[in-house]
Image (tube, rainbow, N blue to C red):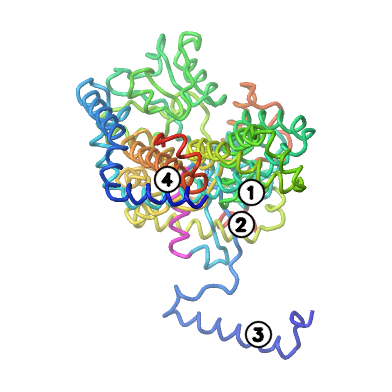
Amino acid sequence: MNAARDAFAGRDAFAGRDAFAGRVRAFLPAMLLAGALAGAWELYADFSGVQQDLLPAPHAVASALWSNGGSVWRNFTVTAEQVLLGLALALACGSALAIAIHLFPLLRRAVYPLAVGSQAVPIPVIGVLLVFWWGFGIFPKLVVIALICFFPIVVSTVDGLAAVDPEQPKLLRTLDASRWQAFRFAELPAALPAALSGARIALAVGVIGAFIAETSTPSSAAYSGLGREIIDNISSGFQTPRAYAATVVLFAFAVACFYALALAERVLVPWHARRRGATA
Amino acid sequence: MRATRTTPRRRVLAGVCLSLVLALSACGSAQNVVSPPSAKRFTVMLDWFPNADHAPLYAAIAHGYFRAVGLDVEPVVPAETAEPLKLLAAGKVDMAISYEPEVLLARDEGLKVVSIGALVQRPLTSIIALGEQRISSVAQLAGKTVGTAGIPYQTAMLHTTLQHAGVSPARVKEVNVGFNLVPAMLSGKVAATLGGYWNYEAVQLRLMHKHPLVIPVNEAGVPTYDELVLVVRENEARADGQDLRAFMQALTRGEHAVRAAPAAAAKLIVKANPSAEERLQLESIEQTLPAAQPADASDPYGWQEPTAWATFANWMYSHGLLVHNPNGGLPPFTNEFLPGQGI
């Protein structure tokens, strides 16, 4: 165990020396592709005759982002807070439900169909109800985000818990481990990679979840998130570049969150990250 | 219990303090600093994101007119336009800004709500066509495609305007473009739209040099109505008359402030809604000001014309938009809280 840890630390030290070059190499393909797509977009917007109000060119989006930086930033902090808190709520409820389903098969049969069905409920249908229960603050929005995010967490965690090598808990039980200890030392670590994959999917949908949450519940603040900013801009029909600028920020935020969680995965389950190599 | 018990001596002290405060506030030099001891929280749900139509409300808040009458007014932005009346009826907000047709629909569904004042005195909903469509009258819409926001009473308005111009509604194709009225016109997918406002979408198009043709629905055969109204629950209208009277008084002062300084009012809107464009808001405020005044100058600000309400309600009823006869029971509006009306 110690040897393995040393070997891992050694690898890290080695990676630290040319970490920058490595990181550039890792992100280069994505940056080149994004650059090429932006170039194609710019050419299309400039020369195809499509109106600026329908598809603004990247340079117009960039200048909208620059000139509204303050407003976009304040809306971003609102949205970011909602996404992170909403995801935390989804993680707490989702993993608790997954563990309960794993431990009590009856619950699986009772809850699973409802959990699947919950994904089909259009949020605007219940938006007013959530506000009726919890008012105009942040909580109804967190509930919406959690409702959208919890499903991938539950499914992947339940599958992860079920996929443990059946010999492991059995072995632990013969060593007089309690049910809880078998769960804690065999099933839980085995399920962690799958659970984290579920969390990454949840995070990616959580950003669009925040958009849905902001646009389907009322709010009383001037800065009430990028989703509101986008809807306000496109529904007036004339500030499309500003709507695109806010969208670009949402896009970047989803990417950043995804990779931040991948980093967390390396710390929490290093054995899994190494096995998969540098995919994330 | 002990902490809340008020001894006579304490009551005397409170009385002295109160009279001292009143005496100080009468001095006048520090007028905008002194506010009434306890302002009552009063939530107003807007009909849409903050825009030029709400200028009197934001002006009254910024100038402290509501605080001066003991109200702490907080505006809330809805997610969609049917929400304000629902949340009002559910008791989550104290007042909702909505539209006369929506108030009639809500009452038809049994919601106990009543309009106590008009923020805008006539229809803003208009038929709008871009200049490049070369349309100059409703009659020229025959054989064309018209976009609406998909609201049933807008479809009825379209039919009425077409019939008024001698065109069979069957000859016009109506498409539901949701809230994308302007993009639908810009992309050339529709010849015209019904649902945009002459003081908003039309102003935007004009600022973009699109030379729009704009026909308000009441100039094309639809009976006139109050586009934006202030709505409360019937119970509160019965019990909290004092607050509502105070609200209307402060709002009237807000409207005077907008009239005196439209540019400052536009700045307040942009502050409340950073996505709003100041130039458009100012233009829109200036265009809306005349529509905020009653046709008869002797009527107070906020006046709702009883015959106009009855005529419009009849129009909705005869088009099958309302199930129950709207002019049967209690009226859907009251002018009793307007300055100079009621008691």
Query: For this rendering, which residue is in front, A185 or A244?
Result: A185
- Sequence-wise first label, 3 or 2: 3
Q: Which residue is mark 1?
A: B232
Chain ID, mark 1 = B
Is B57 magenta? The answer is yes
Residue A129: image quadrant is top right
Q: Quadrant of residue B187?
A: top left
| Quarter occupied by the C terminus of chain B | bottom right
C-alpha separation, residue under disc 4 versus residue under disc 1: 21 Å
Disc number lying in front (3 or 1) = 3
The crowding category of the residue bearing disc 1, from other C-alpha atoms within 10 Å (few below 14, some 14 to 19, many at least 20), is many
**What amino acid type should be assigned to the residue bearing mark 3?**
Ala
Write down the residue under mark 4: B51
* Tag in front: 3 or 2: 3
Which of the two marks, 2 or 1, is nearer to us in this view? 1
Label 2 Cα crowd, 10 Å radius (few <14 / some 14-19 / many 20+): many
- Give the residue at mark 2: B244
Do marks 3 and 2 both belong to one polypeptide chain?
A: yes
Q: Position of residue B114 (x, y in %)?
A: 65, 44
Instruction: Name the element at disc 3.
Output: helix
Q: The disc numbered 3 marks a residue on which chain? A: B
Judge left or right: residue B269 versus residue A156. left
Which region shows up in magenta? B49-64
Mark 4: which amino acid?
Asn
Place of residue B190 in the rendered image (x, y in percent of width and height, measured from the top left): 38, 18
Q: CA distance from mark 4 to mark 3?
A: 43 Å
